[in-house]
């Protein structure tokens, strides 16, 4: 289940939570964030190659490439056995911006994006089938959890791929991480 939690910037204990797709889409659109659901054009096997994944979503990827001028798309897969999972998690958990859109489509698994804008922090739990497009220069961070499980299609306009400008803020420590949020939702 996708979830949006809108927090007061300096008071994480004050929040509103949304679980209906249309509510999430409307709230995120108000801050310039694209949120969509995609389905594959073909069935994907558990061990599908990156090319198989890109082919299964080719129509949606091509539409976004035309819409936003993306030059490339790739697939990133992370699981609990990835040797660099801790270092990657720490890097993504630091608040940062990009000069371009950050677009992620969740082929499988889940991840938690936090968007810090307009005096609020928007926590977006994305799951399989969700696409999120964080606008350029919006401060944000991402948590894949202690034991990640995700496969995402990433789209880029920058030929260098993922390039972040870190803010140096420790705001991310004030908000629930993915594992904590999952615990809240399960309670």
Image (cartoon, helix red, strand yellow):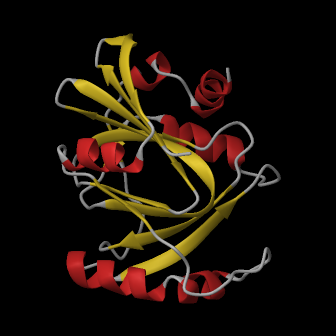
Residue at left 65%, top 38%? 145
Q: Nearer the viewer, residue 152 or 88?
A: 152
Q: Quadrant of residue 182?
A: top right
Looking at the rendered image, the quarter that the C terminus falls into is top right
The reply, left or right, for residue 101 in relation to residue 87 is left
Residue at left 68%, top 27%? 186
Residue at left 60%, top 44%? 144
- Where in the figure is residue 152, as x and y percent of width and height? 56, 65
Q: Quadrant of residue 169?
A: top left
Q: Is residue 80 above or below residue 65?
A: above
Residue at left 29%, top 17%? 8
The reply, left or right, for residue 156 in relation to residue 87 is left
Q: Is residue 7 above or below residue 182?
A: above
- Where in the figure is residue 133, as x and y percent of width and height? 33, 58
Q: Nearer the viewer, residue 150 or 167?
A: 150
Q: Nearer the viewer, residue 89 or 6?
A: 6
Q: Quadrant of residue 181?
A: top right
The reply, left or right, for residue 114 in relation to residue 67 is right
Looking at the rendered image, the quarter that the N terminus falls into is top right
- Where in the figure is residue 179, as x and y percent of width and height? 66, 30
Q: Nearer the viewer, residue 139 or 110?
A: 110
């Amino acid at each position: 289940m996708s979830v949006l939690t809108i927090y007061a910037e300096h008071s994480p204990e004050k929040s509103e939570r949304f679980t209906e797709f249309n509510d999430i889409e409307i709230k995120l659109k108000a801050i310039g964030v694209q949120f969509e659901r995609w389905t594959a054009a073909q069935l994907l096997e558990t061990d599908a190659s990156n090319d198989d994944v890109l082919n299964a979503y080719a129509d949606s990827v091509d539409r976004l490439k035309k819409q936003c001028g993306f030059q490339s798309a790739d697939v990133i897969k992370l699981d609990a056995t990835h040797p660099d999972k801790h270092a990657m998690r720490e890097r993504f958990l630091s608040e940062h911006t990009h000069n371009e859109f950050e677009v992620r489509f969740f082929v499988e698994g889940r991840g938690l994006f936090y968007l810090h804008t307009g005096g609020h922090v928007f926590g977006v739990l994305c799951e399989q089938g969700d696409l999120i497009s964080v606008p350029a220069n919006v401060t944000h961070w991402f948590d894949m959890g202690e034991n990640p499980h995700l496969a995402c299609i990433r789209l880029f306009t920058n030929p260098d791929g993922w390039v972040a400008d870190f803010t140096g803020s420790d705001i991310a420590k004030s908000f629930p991480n993915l594992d904590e949020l999952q615990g809240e939702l399960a309670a």
